[in-house]
Image: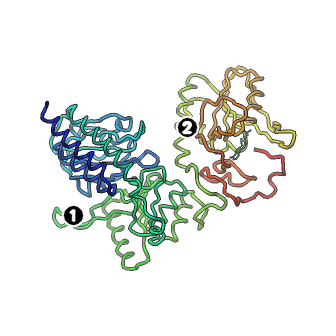
């Protein structure tokens, strides 16, 4: 037997025992990181959890790495060792020369030369990463890789076991006013369970409502030195990646506010490129309004029970759909047919991102529904002849499928060269008539949604996100009668 095999076997025995023991997630994971680093003769080891959108790696536990290295900035899963996200083991021999390293200077300053990264899996889903770091150039062996992979499996097991221990009792939360904003379906360790101040928890909850991505204290900036030694650091409370902005929340204590103002000023002097805002509670809504989230001075939009897709999520998804459409229609001129009015925002964003030539036309319909069933009438027909042309119908949402079925039949009768459908939202559970959808943005549950062009009695079309309508919606000023409505 290779001596490294028995070293790894012993280490794994310890790691599994640690994973199986009861205890807080953070302590358990730190112990696993420490044991794994020692067995690998590595200078450090870190465990990261993917955030709820699968975009960022949140450092959750580590051994042998400095605070400043761990908080060097947000780690984008797609840019930092991207292969790991695709379930591969990634070995980097020299961090200074590898484009897969997001912060090579920080790694250099930390004395890191080689990195081995493996995915942490929950079934066939990547939920995080485990990385080992060495201070000398290292060609990782198959045994090293197998050992770290096995340690990552033990880590996944520890995370699952730790979940109940991370949850705090409700009355605990009520007393402190600080609650964990982490999604129930998420690993509790992926978000901080305690914030330094209740106002941070409130702010995080507000960001969650609007589905604005946030990272809690992801970066520490050195702001004062004594010779080479850092004597003061500043970690802003939040980083909002979609807005590329750091947020520092002020409390009501005047002495702290003055100190925070000083730190922010110093940070701006040292890093003029960094966007940072110092805000108090009253500023939250104004800040959100500035970026198009929520009406001024109102923390939540009246009548909306929750945001289903944020503006940034919609933009990302529409971008992906547009790329696929551009590939599929390359070399074929085509016509986008939008069905008014709900498709307004989606069509506008989609067509701007399609990179091949296209033309646009619109149709409008209105419905009658009553005892006799559901009838659709065309209130605006196409201006264009579609015979022998490639047509892509663009719909906001497909619910029962009746409207789409009617319109697709109508358009097919005009003998286009091809006819496909692209829908932003698909309420598949409600489908009565099945019309094949070539491109779908998101499949959604059976809930009435508004925003991003979609309305309820003529209201809410201007919201920059898609939200679920609550029990007390705004009602429109006579925009619809009892049983006739236009889209
Ligand atoms: P279908 O004929 O039942 O598929 O209905 C499709 C049309 O109903 C859509 O184009 C929308 O105009 C409207 N609709 C269906 N569900 C919703 C919703 O949740 N919010 C807003 N409009 C909806």
Residue at position x 13%, y 31% from top? 2
Label 2: element kind: helix
Q: Nearer the viewer, residue 159 or 79?
A: 159
* Residue marked by disc 2: 353
Which x, y percent locates residue 375?
83, 37
Pointer 1 local density, CA inside 10 Å: few below 14, some 14–19, many at least 20: few
Q: In which quadrant of the rendered image does the C terminus lie?
A: top right
Eyeballing the image, is 198 above or below 469? below
Q: Nearer the viewer, residue 405 or 75?
A: 405
Quarter of the image where ligand 1 sits: top right
- Quadrant location of residue 264? bottom left
* Residue marked by disc 1: 230
User: Is residue 73 visible in this depiction of the protein?
Assistant: yes
Label 1: element kind: strand
Q: Is mark 1 within 8 Å of ligand 1?
A: no
Query: Looking at the image, which residue sits at the far left?
Result: 3
């Amino acid at each position: 037997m290779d001596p490294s095999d028995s070293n790894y076997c012993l280490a794994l025995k310890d790691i599994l025992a640690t994973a199986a023991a009861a205890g807080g997630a953070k302590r358990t994971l730190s112990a696993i990181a420490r044991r794994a680093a020692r067995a690998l003769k590595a200078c450090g080891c870190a465990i990261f959890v993917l955030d709820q959108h699968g975009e960022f790696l949140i450092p959750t536990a580590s051994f042998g790495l400095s605070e400043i290295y761990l908080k060097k900035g947000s780690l984008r899963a797609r840019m930092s060792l991207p292969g790991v996200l695709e379930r591969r083991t990634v070995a980097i021999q020299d961090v200074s020369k590898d484009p897969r390293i997001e912060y090579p200077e920080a790694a250099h300053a930390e004395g890191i030369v080689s990195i081995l990264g493996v995915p942490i899996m929950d079934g066939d889903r990547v939920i995080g990463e485990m990385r080992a770091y060495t201070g000398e150039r290292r060609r990782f062996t198959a045994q090293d890789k197998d050992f770290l992979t096995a340690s990552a499996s033990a880590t996944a097991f520890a995370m699952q076991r730790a979940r109940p221990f991370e949850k705090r009792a409700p009355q605990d939360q009520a007393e402190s006013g600080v609650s964990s904003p982490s999604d129930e379906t998420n690993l509790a360790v992926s978000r901080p369970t305690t914030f330094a101040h209740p106002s941070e928890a409130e702010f995080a909850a507000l960001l969650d409502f609007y589905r604005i991505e946030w990272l809690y204290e992801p970066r520490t900036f050195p702001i004062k030195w004594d010779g080479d030694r850092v004597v003061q650091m500043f970690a802003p409370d939040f980083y909002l990646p979609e807005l590329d902005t750091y947020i520092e929340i002020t409390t009501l204590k005047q002495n702290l506010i003055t100190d925070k103002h000083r730190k922010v000023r110093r940070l701006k002097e040292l890093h003029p490129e960094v966007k940072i805002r110092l805000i108090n509670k009253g500023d939250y809504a104004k800040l959100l309004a500035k970026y198009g989230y929520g009406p001024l001075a109102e923390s939540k939009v009246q009548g909306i029970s929750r945001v289903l897709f944020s503006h940034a999520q919609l933009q990302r998804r529409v971008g992906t759909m547009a790329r696929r459409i551009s590939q599929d229609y390359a070399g074929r001129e085509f016509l986008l047919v939008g069905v008014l009015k709900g498709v307004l925002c989606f069509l506008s964003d989609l067509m701007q991102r399609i990179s091949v030539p296209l033309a646009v036309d619109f149709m409008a319909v209105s419905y009658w529904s009553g005892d006799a069933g559901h009838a659709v009438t065309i209130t605006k027909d196409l201006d264009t002849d579609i015979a022998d042309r490639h047509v892509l119908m663009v719909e906001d949402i497909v619910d029962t499928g009746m409207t789409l079925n009617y319109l697709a039949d109508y358009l097919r009768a005009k003998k286009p060269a091809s006819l496909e459908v692209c829908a932003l939202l698909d309420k598949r559970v409600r489908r009565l008539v099945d019309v094949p959808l070539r491109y779908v943005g998101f499949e959604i549950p059976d809930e009435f949604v508004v925003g991003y062009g979609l309305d309820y009695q003529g209201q809410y079309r201007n919201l920059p996100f898609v939200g679920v309508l609550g029990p007390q919606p705004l009602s429109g000023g006579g925009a619809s009668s009892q049983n006739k409505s236009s889209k």
